[in-house]
Amino acid sequence: MKKILVLATLILFMTGCAHRTEQAVSQKVQQEQPLRNERDLQSRMDQELQRSSLNAAQKAEIYKLREATRQDQSALHDESLRLRSVLAKEMLSPHYNRNEVQVLQKKLRKNEMRQLSLVFDSVEKVNKIIGRETDLEFRQRMMDEMFMPWEMGQPRSLQ
């Protein structure tokens, strides 16, 4: 019973924290200056990286990661454009094939997910370069802290 009460309290606390975090992020996004294109984003990232307190090796590693990610994203973007072009042609074709449209939609969805995965993977890699705990490490630590003492049958204070 105590385990359930502690878990419920933790969930309520995390929900409140998540809401405040959501509001803070929304405010930051609203205050961010608009970007016109990828070059503007790259320039802003360069400025932030130069202002950072990272050492030269970390900065070099991040630049290398950024370039590799940019190339991968460019290839995925090109593939996405090709898929959209074929999808548009298929939609307007007098020989419309529903199965092909569904396959194209599936491929397009998969492509978009790979593009997002690239961004998220890069976040994890940058955290590792900087020496921060990655999301996976954080989740594992939280799970260990939350459940390990109870699984061992000992109160948290005895751990």
Image (tube, rainbow, N blue to C red):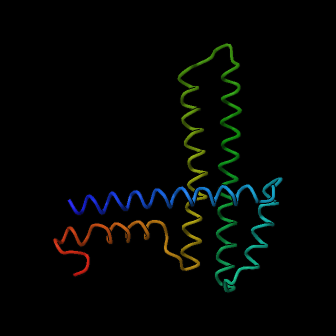
Residue 76 percent coordinates (x, y)? 65, 49
**Location of the N terminus (image quadrant):** bottom left
Task: Left or right? Give the position of 154 relative to 116.
Answer: left
Q: Residue at x 67, y 72 (%)?
A: 64
Say which of 55 and 64 sits in front: 55
Q: Position of residue 19 (x, y in %)?
A: 54, 55
Q: Is residue 12 left or right of residue 6?
A: right
Quarter of the picture containing the C terminus is bottom left
Residue at the (68%, 30%) spot, across then down? 86
**Percent position (x, y) of residue 98?**
56, 20
- Which residue reaches farthest bottom? 55
Q: Which of 147/136 is in front?
A: 147
Task: Give the number of marks.
Answer: 0
Judged from this view, the residue extending furthest toward the left is: 153
Q: Position of residue 59 (x, y in %)?
A: 68, 79
In the image, what residue occupies the spot 66% across and 42% down?
Answer: 80
Question: For the view shown, which residue lies furthest in the top direction?
Answer: 94
Q: Residue placed at 62% from the left, 17% from the top?
A: 96
Quarter of the image for residue 152 reads bottom left
